[in-house]
Image (cartoon, grey):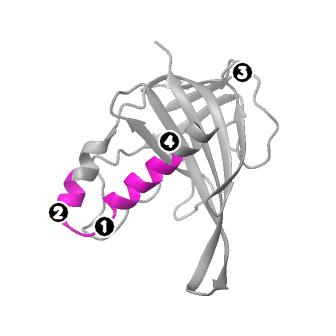
Amino acid sequence: MKKIFFKISAIFLILAGCFSCGQEKIEECQKIFSDNIVGRWKLTVVSVAVSNSLIDVTDYSKENIIFDFQENNKLVVTGPIPDVIVVFDDFQAGEHFYTFQSYNHDCGSVCDKPGPNLFIDKPEFASEERQYFCTIELDDETMQISKSQFCGAIVVDDGFEIKAYTWGKRFIRIK
């Protein structure tokens, strides 16, 4: 569990580093991720955090839940999809339409962080409901799909603390 949380935290830290101002950071951001989403991916782990505190990790590696991202922008999800609110809303078994934009090609302007890059079932313009962050590591063997939902902020001694609900799905590529 700690290893998974560490990997998720590392990805967020890398992304945060990418979003700092400066050409060096933009070039670094462009080298971190692959854009090779096409293929069959097996779900291994789902993690849930509230305000950066991991509250649940579920191992799905023994299940046969497959996300098949096809070249024609069709996503076919198969397997025993859990009835878990929010985490699997747009990822039910069946066929879906998807679009994917690599961070390699859209790291934003110098000080802008890239927005979501995976869209499921033709989201409406400016709708956040079906927009996700998807990162594929350079080895093209592991992928993460995640989403954060802002829940509010509270005042603390040195400013304020943002409250957010975040979930992440980890996958391995099936050869």
Q: Nearer the viewer, mark 1 or mark 4?
A: 4
Of label 4 and label 3, which has the lower sequence position?
4
Which residue is at a point 25% across and 48% down the rendered structure image?
Answer: 30
Residue denoted by label 1: 20
Q: Are marks 4 and 3 in contact (CB under 8 Å)?
A: no
Q: Secondary structure at mark 3?
A: loop
> What is the x, y in percent for residue 55?
73, 51
Q: Amino acid at mark 4?
A: Lys
* Local crowd size for mark 3, using a 10 Å CA cut-off: few (<14), some (14–19), many (≥20): some
Quadrant of the image occupied by residue 63: top right
Q: Is residue 80 left or right of residue 131?
A: right
Q: Amino acid at mark 1?
A: Ser
Q: As rendered, which of 43 and 68 lies closer to the eye? A: 43
Q: Amino acid at mark 3?
A: Gly
Q: Are marks 2 and 4 in contact (CB under 8 Å)?
A: no
The answer to whether one can see residue 59 in this image is: yes
Q: Residue furthest top?
A: 175
* Local crowd size for mark 1, using a 10 Å CA cut-off: few (<14), some (14–19), many (≥20): some
Q: Amino acid at mark 2?
A: Gln
Q: Nearer the viewer, mark 2 or mark 4?
A: 4
Q: As rendered, which of 4 and 130 lies closer to the eye? A: 4
Which residue is at a point 60% across and 39% down the rendered structure image?
Answer: 169
CA–CA distance between discs 1 and 4?
A: 21 Å
First to last magenta residue range: 8-27
Q: Which mark is residue 7?
A: 4
Q: Secondary structure at mark 4?
A: helix
